[in-house]
Image: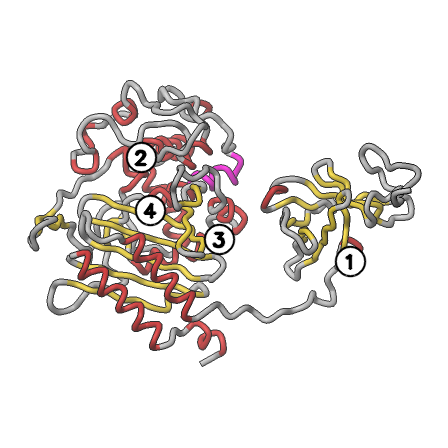
Amino acid sequence: MDALSEDLELLPSTRRALRHRVAVAQSEGRAPSVVAAVARGGQVVWEGSRTSVEGHGPDGNVQYRIGSITKTFTAVLVMRLRDEGLLALADPLEKHLPGTGAGEVTIAQLLAHTGGLAAETPGPWWERTPAELRPELGDVLGEEPFKQTPGTRHHYSNPGYTLLGSLVEALRGKPWEEVLRAEVLEPLGLDRTSGRPQAPHAGGWAVHPWADVMMPEPLEDLGLMAPAGQLWSTTGDLARFADFLLRGDERVLSVESVREMRTPAAPPEPASADLGYGLGMQLVAHGQRRLAGHSGSLPGFVAGLWLSEADDVAAVALANCTSGIAAATLAADLVGIVAEAEPRIPRPWRPFAESDQVPLELCGPWYWGTSAQVVRLKADGSLELGPVGATGRTARFRAEPDGSWTGLSGYYAGETLRAVRREDGSVSHLDLASFVFTREPYEAQAPVPGGVDPQGWRGIG
């Protein structure tokens, strides 16, 4: 066994803790079956299940309906369109999908549920009724689609993701599911994820709240609402999808784009434990841990998928009951069990290769006014700017071909950092979003905005 495999393999005590948590969830939640998986370091390191049926339990190849985790798949398709230059997230929907009656909302607002649209469709419960009742977008949105002023608050909207699915179809000229299969499922090897159930799959059940009896839930095709919740998948496929949402895959989306999806784009609701909503991804705090992913539910099924970037751990939990078991909480707990019992072993530190061009002249202390900052150069070629010995703004920057640097995180995300040089080629100062960073506090020779007092630094006379 190599060192990497040793690091990924879970201890027997951790595996037992995972089995125990799933068993408690199935028993106390009164679920016909629960199936779960944990991935670490890009590999599935544990699978488990619990079922009320004697004999063989479900495994990582059995399909369950995943509900709103479907939204994350739809968001990936939209981000692909953005990365190809076919749309901008700031574009109003009307620019690409005219005539909906909700064209003023931007694509970013739809992705982050800040478009002000209603949470549900008008008419009967869309998840338990035939799609033929909603043949047109007007039937999905209704006569009064807005419940909030667009852009003012986070308000979860299933119809909003119907609009995004229709946007994908309009720009690709193909059905949403066909585009999804060609552009996401096949490249990532998710061959057990589909719009309709494929054997082996679980049946969906409603468990009586006050008696240990159950009845089957109806299985409806969602039609236009499919991009909001249609998909069926397995823990095996979803574990691979979670790894993609962490690391990216150039065949689908870059690591920068999936990181953007995990970045807050909408504030949390007041008094909520959530950390907000990204672009098709929920962001939550679970104890001291920050998680990204999505929950899901449809009649007969509940689901949860979470990943912790800091721990490089992801977990998936699926159950075939309408309510009773909190699958999203279960998945979050599984992440926590592994992360706490077996903390991530960091990769070995390695220096730059001898052939790399290392801009050491940018490294070290700089001053924004009197605020001491430091620039560190990472082995991956990125710059990190942050305060010295105090809390404050910290950001990473990516090198650009023209010698500038683009902010990737924090206050300076998207901003440009430039090293301004003197006639002899040496660095005079750093320019960042109108801020001048100098080697000395208010350095007299640098173009400090507002100038520097000619008498310089002095005490009180």
Packing grade of label 3 (10 A; few <14, some 14-19, many >=20) is some
- Look at label 1 and name its amino acid: Leu
Tell me what residue is drawn at x 35 percent, y 47 percent.
181
Q: Quadrant of residue 61?
A: bottom left
- Mark 4 vs 3: CB contact within 8 A: no
Q: Earlier in the sequence, mark 3 or mark 1?
A: 3
Residue wearing tag 4: 69
Packing grade of label 2 (10 A; few <14, some 14-19, many >=20) is many
Label 3 and label 1: CA atoms lie apart by 30 Å
Q: Nearer the viewer, residue 83 or 8?
A: 8
Q: Quadrant of residue 151?
A: top left
Determine which of the numbered discs, if any, sits on residue 215 in the image: none
Tell me what residue is drawn at x 42 percent, y 62 percent.
313
Residue wearing tag 1: 360
- Look at label 3 and name its amino acid: Gly
153 horizontally vs 398: left or right: left
What span is in magenta?
77-85
Colour scheme in the image? secondary structure
Q: Earlier in the sequence, mark 4 or mark 3?
A: 4
